[in-house]
Image (cartoon, grey):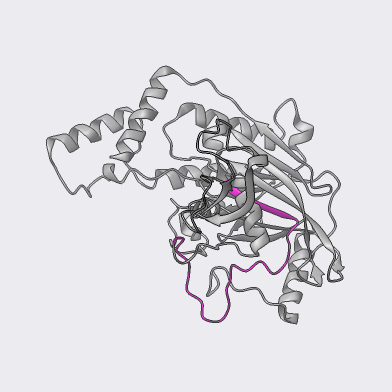
């Protein structure tokens, strides 16, 4: 990995030459119909059998082994935006137990019966094997680390070490890309920028849309855009008004658009979001408007084509661009696959978006086991 996991961007000729080389390497000319598949929250290591089945269906679709093989064959790259593994059950670490009480032994036995792995490395092993299936099908994979991955906590997060993904690391360099978080790349001539979604979720704790209800007893729905101020305001801040104004949370898509408008990926760092200290330049400044901008691990899918003024005079797509012009950016909230079974396909030629959803039946016993696991994690 480089000396800094996500080095500050620069407008120097060296940076421009590097971007041009990357564009040439990954294909500056887009193939008509080529698509990238955005996923997050794969949940590898989870005892859920229905989730495992949904992942298998997704693999069959992307590798062209389904009835809709034509659409699946258009996938040229898979981008996993965090959440690749579940939180390891450290309570069941073999030989590292801090207590040998009867309750701990009973808990370990119960976890074993429910299918929770005693080996905390099992989620990574399952993820490595799953990603290698995509690689063997000829699909390039970019993996963005998330909150439960074994890497540094402070943003920017470093790529996973190759020894953690030994099977995937054996493929030709350039096919399996262990990316940083945030993620910045040129795919098929399109600039793609995104994160695992933690920055967007953290921003939502501090800004909200203020309602403009005229009376405390107005029985309307404050979520209506007609009764709210679209400008972001700090929660709990500002002067008291004679009218009662309540904060209405922004949607993940609105928060993602705010970071694009701010020109900063992590506006709440380092106060709330832990960020890597840098004395030379801020590595989270967005100095070039991307073609695709996404956040992973959202509760639901949402997207919008946003037109923003160009920030630089060069782009990976068209080379020279005059200042003052606007660019269209496809902003995407990638839903958690573990919760929704949904992936997002983006056409690199038109920036059109479509979703693919995979459903699998779940038994009552499995639902009870998942509830027990959630309660155990909370404890």
Residue 92 position (above or below residue 60): below
Point out the image quarter for the N terminus: bottom right
**Residue beneath the point at 52% across and 65% down:** 156
**Residue beneath the point at 75% across and 28% down:** 68
**Left-right relation of 135 to 362:** right
**Residue beneath the point at 73% across and 62% down:** 289
- Residue that protrudes farthest toward the top in the picture: 364
**Residue beneath the point at 51% across and 62% down:** 268
The part of the chain drawn in magenta is 272-296
Whether residue 153 appears in this view of the structure is yes
Q: Position of residue 199 (x, y in %)?
A: 53, 56
Location of residue 378 by image quarter: top left
Q: Does 171 appear in magenta?
A: no
Residue 315 position (above or below residue 210): below
Q: Does 275 appear in magenta?
A: yes
Q: Position of residue 255 (x, y in %)?
A: 60, 51
Q: Exactly how many numbered labels are in the figure?
A: 0
Which of 94/152 is in front? 152
**Left-right relation of 109 to 17:** left
The dominant secondary structure in magenta is: loop
Q: Position of residue 336 (x, y in %)?
A: 55, 40
Whether residue 173 appears in this view of the structure is no
Which of 205/123 is in front? 205
- Residue that protrudes farthest toward the left in the picture: 101
């Amino acid at each position: 990995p480089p000396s800094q996991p996500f080095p500050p961007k620069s407008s120097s000729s060296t940076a421009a030459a590097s971007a041009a080389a990357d564009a040439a390497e990954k294909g500056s000319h887009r193939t008509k119909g080529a698509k990238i598949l955005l996923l997050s929250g794969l949940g590898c290591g989870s005892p859920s059998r229905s989730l495992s089945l949904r992942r298998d269906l997704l693999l069959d679709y992307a590798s062209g082994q389904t009835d809709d093989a034509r659409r699946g064959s258009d996938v040229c790259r898979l981008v996993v935006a965090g959440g690749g593994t579940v939180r390891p059950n450290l309570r069941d670490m073999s030989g590292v137990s801090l207590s040998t009480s009867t309750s701990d032994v009973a808990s370990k036995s119960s976890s074993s019966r429910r299918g929770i792995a005693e080996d905390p490395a099992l989620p990574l092993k399952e993820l490595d094997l799953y990603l290698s299936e995509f690689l063997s099908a000829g699909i390039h994979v970019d993996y963005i680390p998330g909150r439960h991955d074994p890497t540094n906590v402070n943003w920017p997060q470093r790529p996973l070490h190759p020894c953690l993904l030994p099977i995937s690391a054996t493929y030709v360099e350039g096919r399996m890309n262990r990316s940083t978080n945030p993620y910045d790349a040129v795919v098929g001539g399109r600039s793609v920028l995104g994160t695992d979604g933690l920055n967007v979720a953290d921003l939502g704790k501090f800004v909200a849309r203020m309602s403009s209800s005229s009376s405390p007893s107005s029985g309307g729905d404050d979520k209506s855009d007609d009764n709210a101020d679209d400008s972001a305001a700090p929660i709990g801040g500002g002067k008291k008004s004679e009218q009662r104004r309540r904060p209405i949370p922004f949607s993940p898509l609105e928060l993602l658009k705010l970071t694009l408008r701010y020109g900063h990926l992590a506006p709440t760092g380092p106060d709330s979001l832990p960020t890597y200290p840098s004395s030379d330049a801020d590595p989270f400044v967005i100095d070039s408007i991307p073609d695709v901008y996404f956040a992973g691990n959202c509760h639901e899918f949402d997207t919008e084509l946003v037109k923003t003024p160009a920030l630089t005079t060069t782009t990976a797509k068209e080379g020279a661009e005059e200042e003052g012009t606007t660019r269209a950016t496809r902003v995407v909230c990638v839903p958690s696959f573990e919760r929704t079974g949904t992936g997002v396909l983006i056409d690199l030629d038109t920036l059109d978006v479509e979703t693919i959803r995979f459903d699998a039946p779940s038994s009552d016993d499995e639902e009870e086991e998942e509830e027990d696991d959630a309660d155990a994690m909370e404890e």
